[in-house]
Amino acid sequence: MSSSSSKSRISNDLYANKSPGLILGFLMLLNIINMVDRNLLAGFGPQVVSDLNLSDSEFGLLTGAIFVFFYSIMGLVMGFLADRYHRPRIIAVGLVVWSVLTAYSGIAKNFLQLAIARLFIGVGESCLAPTSMSLLSDLYPSRKRGLVSAIYYLGLPLGAGGSFVVAGVLGPKIGWRNSFLIMGALGLVLTLPLLLMKDAPRGREDFIEKSDSGKEGWRHFWETLKQRPALMFTMMGAIFLHIPIGAANFTQIWLVRERGFGASDIATLYGIFFIVFGVLGTLLGGILGDWYNARHKGGRVRLLAIMMLVLAPLLLGYRLVDPSSPFFYIGMCTGLFLMSVFYGPAFSTIQDLSPVRMRARMTALLLIACNLIGLGLGSVITGVVSDLLQDAAVENSLTFSLLAADLMSLLTIPCFFLASLQIARSQVGEVLGNQIDQLPSRGLS
């Protein structure tokens, strides 16, 4: 080994040994801020709808299609950049963009101005997940990636739940507009550490085959998808799971309008439930997913299918019971648990199945599947169906719209089961291939 390569390896090891925990913690913090900014509009749903005189369809567009379309499409662009350039600096640029536009949301006067803000918030936030997942995969080995992904995605329940707590606690005191301004300013403060952060050596925790060198172009990217059906089934499962997650943007409006709760009180309670059961689901998904995957090939996504199958009755039933029943709160917390358990197993599965040099783009493609198709359609369809049912004088229109989205999420079960079977089949084939290659060659007698 040459002295230069030895120095490079020592430098890489020092980088990995000193800072992965700090980097993981800081990226989780950014994800919390990201999710608070993204979901603050849903947390202040009743106030914003009233203040700007929005229809359910317009609110669905703001929380769904307008945001997620640009978030998803630009995520693929950001993934391309993250596979090639300095990842912390890419995140820094995105953080500045989404923080400035979050603050601008606080001074929006109508639907159009708020729509423009949501559009560019989506562009800025699109850099964070693909870049972060790519960076973390170069800091941690495969056996730890489920838990690492889960820790990073603790930002989702902490941030999304935190947005409802902000709405419930700060809303009555300073109003929804000032809350947006404060969150935008906080994001700008957190930009500086990113400018000082080093990037990680790519592929340090993985064996990179020589045959893979140079295969970074888009043609090889799409060929990889065709050749690895487990990737496709995992993404399809993610789509169906995110339809009710998109519909959940209407939860606050539903609880106030059709279940009789006070806006501030239920926002705080819902936020606390989201944090507690979201954190529980995220951590258990990562821990149990790694444990099950070590014993069964494709165990991470199979675990998701099993959990969804077992808990589906609670998820569906609580929509139809009276809020005075304990079953109502049990079902609500079950939904928040299932909403969060997905992230560790699914994102680590995508990282394991993706070539080292295209992990950011594969993560971005997963986010397109989750957000543009699943979350975006879930939010918009829920709003449109609710408006149509209201026009037809149907009572509890949001209840039936949300229940329909919950039913569609059951399609995740066959998708994740098929993904686990494909993973197991491909890994058995690789083992048999390696054993055949190791057999001694025999000449013809």
Image (cartoon, rainbow, N blue to C red):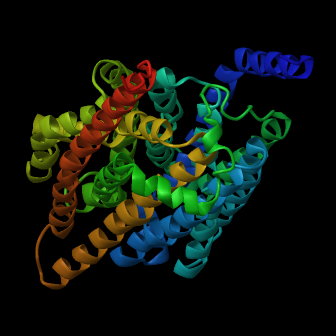
Q: Residue 380's x, y, as percent?
A: 35, 71
Say which quadrant the N terminus sits in: top right
Foreground residue among 112 and 157: 157
Q: How many marks?
A: 0
Depicted 71 relative to depicted 441: above or below:
below
Q: Residue 5's x, y, as percent?
A: 85, 22
Residue sitting at the far front: 445
Residue sitting at the far bottom: 391
Q: Is residue 173 visible?
A: no
Foreground residue among 419 and 330: 419
Depicted 290 relative to depicted 385: above or below:
above
Q: Is residue 88 visible?
A: yes
The residue under the point 52% across, 51% down is: 362
Say which quadrant the C terminus sits in: top left
Q: Quadrant of residue 369?
A: bottom left
Q: Residue 250's x, y, as percent?
A: 33, 61
Foreground residue among 267 and 365: 365
The residue under the point 29% across, 33% down is: 424
The residue under the point 74% across, 32% down is: 200
Foreground residue among 89 and 223: 223
The residue under the point 64% across, 20% down is: 21
Q: Quadrant of residue 356?
A: top right
Q: Residue 394's x, y, as percent?
A: 11, 76
Would residue 102 appear left or right of 328 to someone viewing this image? right
